Amino acid sequence: MKIKRTPWSYRKGNSFLHRLSAAIKLSFLLVISAASFFPNIYVLLSIAFILILLSFSARIMPWELLRGSRPIIIFLFFLLIIQNIEFTPFGFNFLNLEDNLFFILRILCAFSAGSLLFSVTTSFEIRKSLAVLEVSLGLKKANISLSISLMLAFLPQFFKTWEELNLAWKGRGGKNNFKKLKTLIPLTVENMMKYAADTALAMEARGKLC
């Protein structure tokens, strides 16, 4: 039976990307995410091609990087339609349609880059790498590495929480409709707030937060 992985979850492996320094991978994510919005289609296509090659090198199918992006795609398409509807006279403006579609592709490239990062890098590796940079810059007392690593850890945790609630929803016979979003979104937000509070209490108990 094929196991359905949680979006943005870590995958054990020994590939080149798994062994690469977390600092390099995090820097690559920032560069790729920023470059995705560069107003040039060839840059965008190059980024997509690089992500495909890297996913294969990490033994991940490229389309698996998009797992969890369906709500984003639906929202962006809905926004695209709303933005291009004209009411005087009533019709649909196709002039900006191409730019809107490329914007969606840019979002998906940035999403895929983040998914690839967390597929081959643990939160501990990210924090450890940032801590080294923190010490070299004389910012150890600021504890920036802890703050950034905790912030980044929220991204895969969000998808994990959503997947658990979604599985429970389907187990009770729930359908993929507006009622699902109306029910699960508040629960996801509530669980994430609880996760943040529990994390803060744990860090405070260990003397990590002032």
Image (cartoon, rainbow, N blue to C red):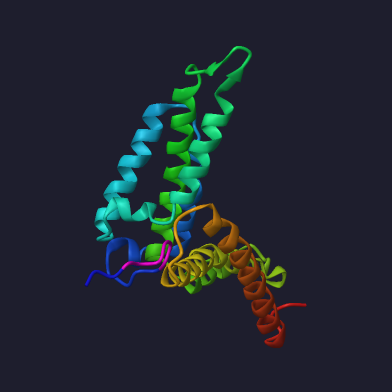
Please tell me whether residue 179 is drawn above or below residue 49 in the rendered image.
Answer: below
Q: Which residues are magenta?
A: 4-9
**Residue closest to the eye, 101 or 88:** 88
Q: If the image is split into quadrants, where does the N terminus sit? A: bottom left
Q: Residue at x 32, y 72 (%)?
A: 12
Q: Nearer the viewer, residue 6 or 125?
A: 6
Q: Quadrant of the C terminus?
A: bottom right
Prevailing secondary structure class for the magenta stretch in the rendered image: loop
Location of residue 67 in the rendering, given as x and y in whole percent from the top left corner? 38, 56
Q: Is residue 208 left or right of residue 176?
A: right
In this orientation, which residue lies closer to the viewer: 111 or 210? 111
Q: Residue furthest front?
A: 173
Q: Residue 202 occupies which quadrant of the picture?
A: bottom right
Q: Is residue 109 above or below residue 98?
A: below
Task: Residue 16 in the image: state x and y as whole percent.
Answer: 29, 62
Query: Could you tell me residue 17's position as x and y percent?
Result: 33, 61
Quarter residue 173 falls in:
bottom left
